[in-house]
């Protein structure tokens, strides 16, 4: 759900990504030629992002050594929680959200174009999938 005050951003564009995460990433895939997939790794100081939605699905993976307090509004739901320890946030494309954290944090972002995900899924399973928003996934289990 996108409100009229929410910025819609393309995370494959370095300048647009900097509107959400102004710290320069330590590692970025912008110049690799990858189509539909972007990888970024940050060591970012405390920050509150602008409310935004991305054109891509994103997985935000925190460093296993990090533990910090975070606030997030995701799809109209607010949560204040201890975060880090390698947890993963799943944020579907076009979902309005913002995040606030209280200390320097190391994390990676994998942004996946919905078209690439759907094409890959259709090739593998011959049907589309839907991502379900998650605040944090601890110890993910592959089924």
Image: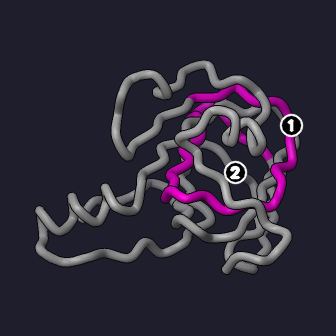
What is the crowding at mark 1: few (fewer than 14 residues within 10 Å), some, or many (at least 20)?
some
Q: Which residue is disc 2 drawn over?
A: 83
Q: What element carries label 1?
A: loop
Q: Which of 115 and 75 is in front in this view?
A: 115
Where is residue 47 drawn, in percent x and y?
86, 41
**Secondary structure mostly seen in the magenta stretch:** strand
Q: Which of marks 1 and 2 is nearer the N terminus?
A: 1
Q: Nearer the viewer, residue 120 or 131?
A: 120
In the image, residue 131 sits, relative to residue 40, either above or below, namely: below
Q: Which residue is disc 1 drawn over?
A: 46
In the image, residue 92 sits, relative to residue 116, either above or below, namely: below
Where is residue 108 drawn, in percent x and y?
55, 36
Q: Can residue 46 be found in the magenta stretch?
A: yes
* Residue positioned 69% across, 34% down in the render: 15
Q: Which of 82 and 28 is in front in this view?
A: 28
Where is residue 37 drawn, in percent x and y?
39, 42
Q: Can residue 8 be found in the magenta stretch?
A: no
Q: How many circles with numbers are drawn on the protein? A: 2
Q: Which of 31 and 92 is in front in this view?
A: 31
Which quadrant does the C terminus fall into? bottom left
* Residue positioned 58% across, 34% down in the render: 63
**Is 97 positioned to the left or the right of 26 in the image?**
right
What is the crowding at mark 2: few (fewer than 14 residues within 10 Å), some, or many (at least 20)?
many
Which quadrant does the N terminus fall into? bottom right
Which coloring applies here?
one colour
For the record, the magenta segment spans: 41-68
* Residue positioned 49% across, 59% down in the render: 57
* Cα distance between the residues tagged 1 and 2: 13 Å
* Residue positioned 83% across, 30% down in the render: 45
Q: Is mark 2 on a helix, strand or loop?
A: strand
Where is residue 140 drawn, in percent x and y?
40, 57
In the image, residue 50 sits, relative to residue 19, either above or below, namely: below
């Amino acid at each position: 759900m996108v409100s009229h005050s929410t910025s819609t951003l393309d995370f494959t564009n370095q300048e647009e990504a900097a509107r959400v995460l102004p710290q320069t990433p330590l590692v970025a895939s912008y110049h690799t030629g990858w189509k539909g997939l972007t990888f970024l790794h940050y060591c970012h100081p405390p920050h509150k992002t602008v409310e935004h939605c991305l054109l891509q699905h994103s997985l935000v993976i925190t460093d296993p050594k990090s533990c910090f307090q975070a606030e997030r509004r995701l799809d109209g739901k607010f949560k204040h929680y201890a975060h880090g320890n390698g947890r993963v946030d799943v944020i579907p494309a076009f979902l309005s959200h913002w995040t606030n954290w209280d200390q320097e944090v190391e994390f990676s972002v994998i942004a996946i174009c919905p078209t690439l995900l759907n094409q890959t899924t259709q090739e593998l399973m011959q049907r589309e999938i839907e991502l379900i928003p998650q605040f944090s996934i601890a110890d993910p289990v592959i089924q």
